[in-house]
Amino acid sequence: MSREGKIQPYIVHFIGGTISIAVHNESTSSMYLTTTLAARLSMILCAVLLVGCGDNAQTPAPSATSSTQPSKAAPKIRASASTPAPASIATVTLQSIELTSTDASIGIGESSALQVVGRYSDDSTQNLLPKVIWHTNKKGIIRILKGEIHGTSAGIVQVTVTLDGVSSEPLAITVGYTIGGSIHGLLEGNSLSIINNGSIEEIITNGDTFTLRNKFIPKTAYDIQASAIQNAQPCTQTYGKGSVSNSNVSSIQIICGIPSKGVSAASTDISNARRNHTTTLLSNGKLLIAGGANDTGSIASAELLDAANNKFAATGSLKQARHSHSATLLPDGKVLVVGGIGEGVTRLSSAEIFDPVTSKWASTGSLNIARRGHTATLLPNGKVLVVGGIGATGQGILSSAELYDPATGKWRVTSGLSTARTQHTATLLPNNMVLVVGGTGPSGSLSSAELYDTDTDTWHRTGSTLTPRYLHTATLLPNGKVLITGGLDDKGILASSELFDADSGQWTSAGKLTDARYSHSAVLLPTGLVYVTGGNSAGGKHILASAELFDPATGVWSTTGASIHARSQHTTVLLNNGKAITVGGTSNGDALSNVELYW
């Protein structure tokens, strides 16, 4: 029974010949009836219903104005066996309050509607939202306004309400940050199952991105495991393990594909042979190949591969020819190309932006220091960190680092490395730190490693590699560790590989490649295996076609199907269909135009 409105209908009870009448007053949530009103209602019911009348019930005396008229006989009223008790008041009281929310986990700036329902002793219910008094155990986390909770800062708060001495059970509200990222290669009609710290999470998908519905406060640890359901499909993930800082986590990459057969097949050749170029998988699934060098020097041409029809097409050329540059996919889907070598041996400070919607390049802010052989890493806050490299003539190997802000198109110098280096690697870790490993410095090959803290904008030393190396590869594994393979040291070409554990800051051996190699490529497959192909060997005079697989679960290396063409200084990227594509490179001094697929 709902209790809406100002005054509810009278409630009449007949108990043992006694009339009991009550009315509900909404302002006090209690039952009352005046003595006069109760008496009058008792008389009416007595006359009409012939119930509830005592022995001494009397016919009202005639008024003075009617005394001259013949009186009519009053209706006879059957008397009760005994004199009834006066009308009594039935008291209905508030028994409990239930407080609920449409969403108990919200982001900062988000809101959630509240419901407050009271239950009374007569089993009726009422919406108490406008009447209750609100209580929270912490201040500054939420605001309650017009029946809605608004998140203002990260934290967990307990909310209760009270009315007429009755309190609700506490309602826990979490205000925090999202955890999510990108999805690659999931088959049409298939869906993902996400497990976080052993529990299934509800997810929200939007095209090729996903977020967990729950929000998380800073320092919350997460460990994401992804799998495809409905249709059998191997899936793995990177950046899936870490802890929440003071921002949304959007770096998790879920990679799904077809089961590997260990074979390579020729694809459509690119229009311009090139080496030391960049290859970037765009948000629309196409592949952007930009710049590089051919047998005559740096080139400005760029090409797009449409994986759906396996065809390359020319697109807008770079503003400036360059090779040994970097390319970074930005959150808005555009690509930032930075530095490199231009005409001759000129180090470049210029930077350009490729817009996949218009297929055109546009200049953006230039680096403060020209460089090539550097690394560029997209940070969780959307900025790009450029580290090290070789500067302009006379500057030598660099220790400096710069940050690019896409919102302003400008660079600023940030804190520098402890050790100047080039031909190193940089990897964003699940804890949002950037791991820079090895390279070559003013005194030769390096074993040192450094960590960049994105929250404090500072560098810290971490454990050194077991073997100094440069021109190696670094691959983030699903378990959060980093695998480095091959490279060069001051003594020659390396076959060794190592694993970095971010929790301990230490390196351990990961076994040996079958073929020592440098200037090769490595990519994580949907199966969780790491595919390594090509590179230089035998004193740099021999180019490799061989390929190998590393299994993080067993720590074992094994050979797999060799490439059709031997190559080094190439690129290998995982496509959305789960196949790895290898583009260009050099073989015995000649730039290559051929392209291969591995799965």
Image: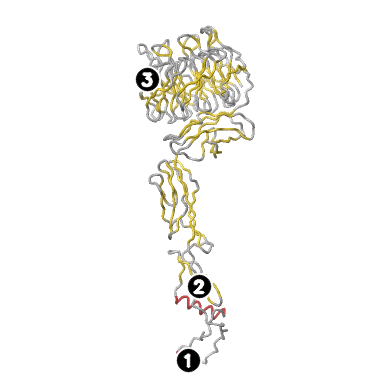
* Image point (37%, 27%), residue name: 457
Pointer 1 with pointer 3, Cβ within 8 A: no
Gap between marks 2 and 1 measured at Cα: 35 Å
Q: Tell me the element at label 2.
A: strand
- Of residue 449 and residue 328, the one placed in the foreground of this image is 449
* Image point (48%, 89%), residue name: 66
Gap between marks 1 and 3 measured at Cα: 118 Å
Instruction: Give the residue number, with chain letter if any, for mark 2.
Output: 21
Is residue 475 depicted above or below 87 in this figure?
Answer: above
The local crowd at label 2, few if under 14, some if 14 to 19, many if 20 or more residues have their Cα within 10 Å, is: many
Instruction: Give the residue number, with chain letter if any, for mark 3.
Output: 418
Q: Position of residue 504 (x, y in %)?
A: 46, 26
Q: Position of residue 116 (x, y in %)?
A: 48, 54
Q: Position of residue 22 (x, y in %)?
A: 49, 70
Instruction: Give the residue number, with chain letter if any, for mark 1.
Output: 67
Please state, as top left, top right, bottom left or bottom right, where the N terminus lies in the image: bottom right
Q: Amino acid at mark 1?
A: Ser
Q: Amino acid at mark 3?
A: Ser
Q: Tell me the element at label 3.
A: loop
